[in-house]
Amino acid sequence: MIFLTVGSQVPFDRLSRSVDAWAARNPQAEVFGQIGRTAWRPAAMQWAELLSADEYVELLKRARVIVAHAGMGTVISAAEHGKPLIVMPRRADLGEHRNDHQEFTAKWLMTRSGISVVHGEDELWQLLDKAGTLVPPGGLGSESCERMVTVLREFIFEGVKPFR
Amino acid sequence: MMDNGSKRPRILAVASGGGHWMQLMRLRDALLGGDMAFVATHFPDYRKSIPPGARFYLVTDANKKDWLRGALLICELFWIILRERPDVVISTGAAPGYFALRFGRLLGARTVWVDSIANVGRMSLSGRLARRYADLWLTQWEHLARPEGPHYIGAVL
């Protein structure tokens, strides 16, 4: 299954429409889209405006590939569940976000394995056509996270500040 | 506050729903052993993902464009801080975390701001505002770290 998710904050119809159009051309593929609160309605894929956290995890587990905006929630989810991820950054000039920070995030994500960054429908369709060959993301960088946890514990439980 | 070592510190951990919350959950091992309360937006069922025994509050989501919701959020957080009386407030953003740090500091809590890893180019707006109220003011990007802060101690990814 292809699982599209645009996050809980604002819809991202440009991405949702592209995925739905691909679903219309590939009726054999199972596609589910979480599309946000929007007036537009998908024609081909299954969809929901919002998902509960439980439903979200259930779809993550079932997904073969995740398609998303360049939001950190999805990036972490995909890594934790070992699912290949295709992201399309939101663009502020199209009114898709308050600022272009997703473009910056996307530039960094491009350097990570298992994550593909696309900017338009053609690129997205090319990747969806070969969804079965996409590889899952590498590790979560747990060493860096563990170091962070250690320093935070020292601050929280012993009042030790790592800096002056 | 720190010399009564036998007492578990009261910790208030705050994050908006979505990516901020998932980053807070990546850091939850840092809180284990404390007397924990969590604050989130959007998703009531986050309650199920917090450690056993921890308290959970859902607050209104707000951004700088929406004054009414902002006012509601401020009231909710102030009430939570009065009720919880935390020793430590930690947040991964965004707006609710800023207010939580601010009110927490006012009542004597030690405070931690962890700016979202999504902010690769510069600190977030709420992160920049939180600077004055954060004892630990952290970025998850080494290239954004400065001697006077924000500091870098690692990243959740």
Image (tube, coloured by chain):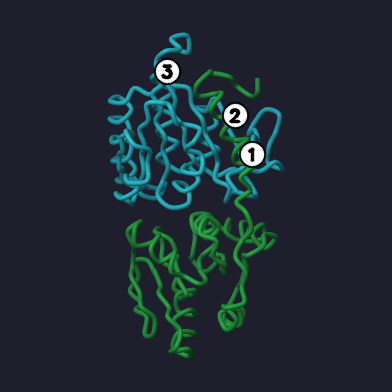
Chain colours: A green, B cyan
* Side of A94 where A139 appears, left or right: right
Q: Which residue is mark 3?
A: B108
- The location of residue A45, given as percent across then percent down, is 39, 81
Q: Chain of mark 2?
A: A
Locate residue B85, reporting x and y percent.
34, 22
Residue A72, placed above or below residue B48: below
Q: CA distance from mark 3 to mark 1?
A: 27 Å
Residue type at mark 3? Gly
Task: Tell me if mark 1 has few (under 14), some (14-19) or many (20+) residues whose alpha carbon lies within 10 angstroms of its own.
Answer: many
Residue with the mark numbered 2: A151
Quick check: A21 left or right of A145? left
Determine the CA span between mark 1 and mark 2.
9 Å
Quarter of the image for the C terminus of chain A: give it: top right
Residue B154: numbered disc: 1
Q: What amino acid is labelled 2 in the image?
A: Val
Query: Local crowd at mark 3 within 10 Å, few (<14), some, or many (≥20)?
Result: few
The picture places residue A91, in percent across and down from the top left corner, at: 55, 65
